[in-house]
């Protein structure tokens, strides 16, 4: 079992729709969770961090965390073509240092 | 812009050669982590430097080594390059206090091609 799992996609949504990206992780003691956006040929860009169960909203983005189910999600409202990218879920590995474990990413395509 | 800068942006090396990649961390950050990202994969943790010492290492052989300098900048060195080392190398900067760290911000990456 991979430590962090994401559907590879592509997830295709029409412009203006809600895109829902999901991530599961295997280590129950993980404490910090992050979503990064990566455009083709570019480096990952941090868009959301979440540390507590529940929802966290930032503009059009909402991160949701359920530690009991070991599940993290990212919702993108009013999706725009500029949101088309690969979204990487990352989990902070416990153990005394800030090591991030990444999923393979979900490719999102927003079509006009 | 994250304030994390990497150099060079692109590099082509021959198998068996050695390479050094550089990273300047964001102002106020004291921790640098290095990641390798192969095409179509998520970044894989190589190692982290905190207080000029290696502080955690992923599943990479000893020919991957690094340094952190007093100004918190860092180098990644790879000896005896192999074709499979071709990847995007990412540096991530964060601030660490105690055992936890803040959010990590990535530089633009170095694309290494080994031929």
Image (cartoon, rainbow, N blue to C red):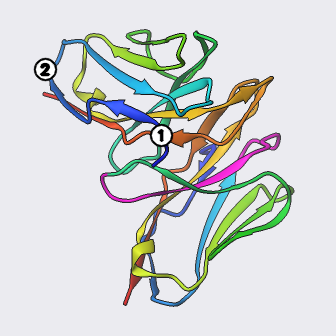
Q: Which residues are magenta?
A: A26-41
Residue A31 placement (x, y as % from top left): 79, 43
Dot 2: element: loop
Q: Residues within 10 Å of mark 1 (few under 14, many from 20)?
A: some
> Which residue carries the number 2 mark?
B14
Q: Earlier in the sequence, mark 2 or mark 1?
A: 1
Residue B91 placement (x, y as % from top left): 46, 32
Residue A107 placement (x, y as % from top left): 43, 66
Task: Identify which residue, B109 or A10, lies in the foreground.
Answer: B109
Residue A42 placement (x, y as % from top left): 35, 51
Occupied quadrant, residue A63: bottom right
For disc 1, the chain is B
Image quarter hosting the N terminus of chain A: top right
> Which residue carries the number 1 mark?
B3
Q: Residue at position x 59%, y 54% from top?
A: A5
Prevailing SS of the magenta stretch: loop
Inspect the magenta stretch and tell me whether residue B65 lies in it: no
Q: Residue at position x 36%, y 22% from top?
A: B22
Image quarter hosting the C terminus of chain A: bottom left
């Amino acid at each position: 079992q991979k430590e962090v799992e994401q559907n590879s996609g592509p997830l295709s949504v029409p412009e203006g729709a809600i895109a829902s990206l999901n991530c599961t992780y295997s280590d129950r003691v993980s404490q910090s969770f992050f979503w990064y956006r990566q455009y083709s040929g570019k480096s990952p860009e941090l868009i959301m961090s979440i540390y507590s169960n529940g929802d966290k909203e930032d503009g059009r983005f909402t991160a949701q965390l359920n530690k009991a189910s070991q599940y993290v999600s990212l919702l993108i409202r009013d999706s725009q073509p500029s949101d088309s990218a690969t979204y990487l879920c990352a989990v902070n590995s416990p153990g005394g240092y800030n090591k991030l474990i990444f999923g393979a990413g979900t490719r999102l395509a927003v079509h006009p | 812009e994250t304030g994390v800068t990497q150099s060079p942006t692109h590099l082509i090396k021959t198998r068996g050669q050695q390479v050094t990649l550089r990273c300047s961390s964001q102002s106020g950050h004291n921790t640098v982590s290095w990641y390798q990202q192969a095409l179509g994969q998520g970044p894989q943790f190589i190692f982290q430097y905190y207080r000029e010492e290696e502080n955690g290492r992923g599943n990479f052989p000893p020919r991957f080594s690094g340094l952190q300098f007093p100004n918190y900048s860092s180098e990644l060195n790879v000896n005896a390059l192999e074709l499979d080392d071709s990847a995007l190398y990412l540096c991530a900067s964060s601030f660490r206090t105690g055992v936890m760290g803040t959010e990590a911000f990535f530089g633009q990456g170095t694309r290494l091609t080994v031929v």
